[in-house]
Image (tube, helix red, strand yellow):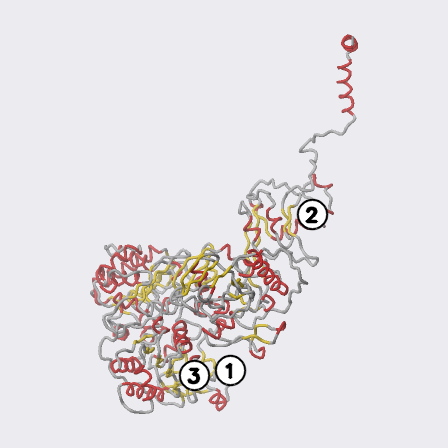
Amino acid sequence: MKNVFETIFFTEILQGLGITLSHMFKKPVTYRYPFEATPIQDRFRGIQYIKTHADGRTKCVGCYLCQKVCPSECIHIETDCGPNGERLIRKYELDLSRCIYCGYCEEVCPVDAIHMGWEWNTVASDRSGYVINMKTLSQNYKDNVEGNWKNKHLKKKLVEGVQQ
Amino acid sequence: MVTVKIDGKEVQVAPNTLILDAAKEAGVSIPTLCHDSRLNPFGACRVCLVEQVGNPKLQAACTTPVTDKMEIVTRSEKLSRVRKTAIELLLINHPLDCPVCDKGGECTLQDLTYEVGVTKVRFDAKPNDTPVDHTNPFIERDIDRCVLCGRCVRVCDEVVNIQAISFLNRGTDTIIGTSFEQPWNCEYCGQCISVCPVGSLNNRIYLFKNRPWNLDRVKSVCGLCSCGCTVDIDYEGNEVFRMKESPEEGINHGYMCAKGRFGFEFINSIKRESEAVVKAGGESKKVSFNEAVEVAVEKLKKVKDTAGADAIAVVVSPRLTNEEAFLAGKLAKDVLGTSNLFSTESNEVYPEATLEEVENSDCVTVLNIDVTESNPILGLAVRHAARKNTAPLAVFYPGYTALRRVSKNFVTGNPDEVRAAMESYAAAVAGASNDYSALAAKLTNAERPVVVFDPYNKADVKIAQDIKKACAKVKIVPAKSKNNSVGIVDMGFGAKCATEFAKGLESGKFKAVIVLGENLSARSVWTKSASKAAGLELLLVTDPFMSETAAMANVYIPVATFAEKSGSFTNLEGRVQSIEKAVDKGVNTDACVVSALAKGLGAQLPADVSAVRGMIEKEVPLYSGINWDGGVVSYPYVFAGEVAATDGKAKGKGKFFLYPASLRLHSGSFTRWSPDLAKVYGEPMLEIGVEDAKELGIKSNDRVKVKGEGFEGEFLVEIEKKVSKGCIALPEDFVATAGIFCNGKSLRADIVK
């Protein structure tokens, strides 16, 4: 009896149309990349930044642990003794073309200096910009804090996450 | 022998063995922090506590000797709690700055913390925060990190015998420091750095440059003085980061001196040359290695054709390896056909006693040499004999040296008085009765007497020979100066007198000279005639640096230092030890230069170490079947023949006696390129006694003129209370002073302000 009713009045089709209709009023789940920004999760691991103290000095102490732990060997550090016997970082280089964004450097850092950021766009027409140094890494921190994303898609990313 | 049971394993050990050593025998490891097997037991850290069955008290394994049927437990619940607490207590005041501490990665405290599993400190952690002490040019002292194990204090006292540092204050205020907290000024041997288990004493040359896990390591032999210390060369890529001791290994037992520990920086020097230079018509041009060799070969051929093979001379430096010196000899004799092989060394005297024999000697005599500066590890051996064996130590030297602390018989005075004293001492040994009879009796009555002397001073060699002749059981130690001073003689570069080369240069007999690594201008025998070398048809100089002689050369080829080549050195005992290549600075070795020259001249000489060693074993009888890793060459004689009696009296006229001082912090002309050593001691300093300085009204760091018969020079003054009245001293081996000591070893001079 029920079957006859369903056959005569196309209830299943209407059900299907109902679902379709309900989706018409929902927000779309797809993004029209590259015209539209894709969301970035809080725990996304993008290009690193290195935190600085309030006076602009880097928090990094040059302990070489990130260099040691890096599985793709993309970090290169050179340290020396400064004029007053302090530890001096002569060179801190990170090769983004080698980095696999595993986040081990962030994990191992004993002074909470290096972090994975949300910026991810490294596309360039040549490779010269891939090796970034302490200056860029500190600037990345500033950009992350201030929300100066190079990437338009990141505009909405919360700044508080970085400031923590 | 007594039987001990350690963790259920029974071992037989000699009575009075420490529990720690017995455990090692049984294959049981006990953690230690303050223990060093070379030092007396101390028991400061309580980390090595063990349980003795039947004894309610815990025993420190590093201080307690075993008794028969002792039963020891090293691992138990109670012990791990005790050890953990000991470490936790140490960590109360220890700042946890491991990321910036140079010791991080090779720190005993760090390892122990992991081993016992301390994850949090139960006590109120109060890390100290006192400023770091930088008064010592080579050693950084951070007393905050100190765990007061006392190893530095003990090594400075027991081994080096300088007592520069000690415990200050009492109880919780105890720190390691200098007396009355004066600036830290010592011999700079750095033994304290090598024994420090934490990052309290650090090497300032290596400070913050790298971390231990980045460094690769080769075990090699130090290439500075002729002691032949086993060292570890730590490098990353092509840069040497530090030279450190191999713990408790080698003839040096893991001890090193300031030169070896802090003077390696010349290897990385940016002042090193990388390209060969050829001078033609007053113009110098940078050329490739092959081009330079071609030019040299052309000129050699020309000289050989026009003036004969006798117009060619080969000079080698004692810095070369045995293999290179042998090849140079082959090139000269077989390829060029000349017998003009020269070096500063001579085969008049060969080594006899080993360093071990010096250490175990029961009577040591040191004749007119400051061994603690010239050959520091030999100096340690002498101190060991005097301190640990309480061997009577007689020292003859114009001024007091560091041996004064251990010597009851220190004969000093002006050089003439010292010479007279040494002569009467030698006569007393031979049986004469004079003031030194009692001292000589100690030598003749001893079972294993040793005499240390300076083989470069003819008058001293004569005295040593007289002593040896009178008392045959005396073993002699000629304190040679450079790393392979003995080896190049064995390879045939000691047969001709060095003065013959000077004469040949003066008379114009030599038209082509090949100088391998030597700096003619800085050697007192050659300095006068060195300028003649500039006008030669060919002056081929190989040197890592543009030395004074290299600057005169018409063909200059940069070469490798000892860290960049393999081979072997023969040290002052006659011990052959292999060196290993650590880094590559992109320059050729002397062996390559010789081999390329031979090839150009139409002969074949291998540059490969193993091939050359095969040739040496065949052609040098002394080295046939030698163990290249520590074999001692047995020499046929000690003294070649009767040493001619020379008048050792001071030459010339003047108010002061001038004698060659030991090279402080340096080993010849090589280490002068080390920026850190040069900072402390960069140019020759005129040492003068306090009284004389006062009389003349001169202060430290004044510049004064020294004038004598046939020489004159201006030097910085260093007031040194060890120097006797009426004496002044200058170091040899500097270009400025070589011109003075070419007149004689003992001179008279005046000081003109």
Q: Are marks 3 and 2 on the same chain?
A: no
Question: Is residue B111 shown to the viewer in this render?
Answer: yes
- Judge the density around disc 2: few (<14), some (14-19), many (≥20) Cα neighbours within 10 Å: many
Q: Nearer the viewer, residue B24 or B494?
A: B24
Q: Position of residue B284 (x, y in %)?
A: 38, 62
Identity, as a three-letter code, of the amino acid under mark 1: Ser
Q: Left of B551 or right of it: where is B704?
A: right
Question: Is residue B506 shown to the viewer in this render?
Answer: no
Can you name the residue that lies furthest to the front here? B54
Name the subunit of mark 2. Answer: A
Q: Are marks 1 and 3 on the same chain?
A: yes
Identity, as a three-letter code, of the amino acid under mark 2: Asn
Q: Are marks 2 and 1 on the same chain?
A: no
Identity, as a three-letter code, of the amino acid under mark 3: Tyr
Q: Nearer the viewer, mark 3 or mark 2?
A: 3
Image disc number at residue A144: 2
Q: Nearer the viewer, residue B377 or B147?
A: B147
According to the picture, the residue beneath numbered tag 3 turns out to be B400
According to the picture, the residue beneath numbered tag 1 turns out to be B700
